[in-house]
Image (cartoon, rainbow, N blue to C red):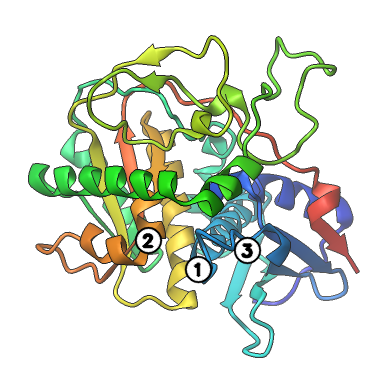
Amino acid sequence: MSASHVDADTAARLVADAVTAPSMHNAQPWRFLLHSATGTLELRGDPERAMTRTDPDHRALHLGCSAALFNLRVSAAWNGLGTQVALLPDAGDPWLLATVALGPPTEENHELAALHDALRRRHTSRHPFGDERIAPALLDGLRAAARLEGCRLTVPDSWHTETVLALVRDAEHREEMDPLVRAETASWTTGAPGPSPTTTTATATARGDGIPAAAFGPRSSGAATAPVRDFGRAHPVPGRGWAVFEKHPQLALLGTPTDTPADWLRAGQALERVLLRATADGLATSMTSQPLEWPELRWTVRDPLASVGHVQMVVRLGYGPSGAATPRRPVTEVLEIR
């Protein structure tokens, strides 16, 4: 595929779509550099936005950045451009996660462009979901989405789902006992409301990152731990409601056969493809990563009856509110053009 000239406005549109991707605590640990002469974009990780306590090997950072990479591919396809991606192109520069050559449309453009409408409708939902079970055909479509990115999505049966939920509770207890983890989470959380149609400029949070109170969702009033992270523990919000979460959450495990940085980059793209496909199919989604942040728990998350070697993310699926939008940094902060 030959390179194509990309002007600053086009690059800004692509990156504006890319950064709608999810990332751990909405830290948005990505930077983009456009080489105008060649039409090539660099995706770089931002070490200043790494979670040093809960993500010391930067696995989650890779997942978030590569979810943005997938969104970039979707946006390019929507704008009539093809992409040729090279992962980890320079062994001497570990923060250079990928290069993207932009050029004429490719065979995958139609399928990628079809997901564009879901980019800004996909939000992490920390609300209860309904009891309606997801149709097997929809689950098959999500499995296929993961396979297209070289990963595997498995749906654990009820007994292993209970195991995963128990690991979530274990991870939460470990967080409560670790002041460094609590401080790290609190630093990316704010009790101020996020931007909304009823939020004035004066009361809206000035931050363009992190998790605002509007995205916390309700507290769980049931005996069991809710299958979502409760960011309200770091910043209690007066008047925050209570709700009973689903008794039998519908979970899916996204995994890779090995566990290298390249696997993490493939997994992040697969994760975003699954999330966008789910959104397009009318499903609400959230992610549960707490047990994956503790090495002694992570191995147990894998389903022993499935052939997934390393779980990269636990995805919760169902029917319910789509969740509140979280803030994004302006494109001018994350895109450099040369």
Return the disc, 3 or 2, that comes first in the chain's sequence.
3
Q: Amino acid at mark 2?
A: Trp
- Determine if residue 22 is in view: no
Q: Are there few (<14), some (14-19), or many (20+) residues within 10 Å of tag 1?
A: many
Q: Which mark is residue 265?
A: 1
Return the disc, 3 or 1, that comes first in the chain's sequence.
3
Q: From the top left corner, tell me how far across and down residue 184 is, in percent.
A: 59, 50
Return the disc, 1 or 2, that comes first in the chain's sequence.
1
Q: Quadrant of the C terminus?
A: bottom right
Of all residues, the one furthest to the bottom in this rendering is 92
Check contact, mark 1 vs mark 2: CB within 8 A.
no
**C-alpha span from label 3 to label 2:** 38 Å
Q: Write the residue at 28% across / 53% down.
A: 253
**C-alpha span from label 3 to label 1:** 19 Å
Check contact, mark 3 vs mark 2: CB within 8 A.
no
Q: What residue would you read off at disc 2?
A: 294
Q: What residue would you read off at disc 3?
A: 82
Looking at the image, residue 54 lies above or below residue 213: below
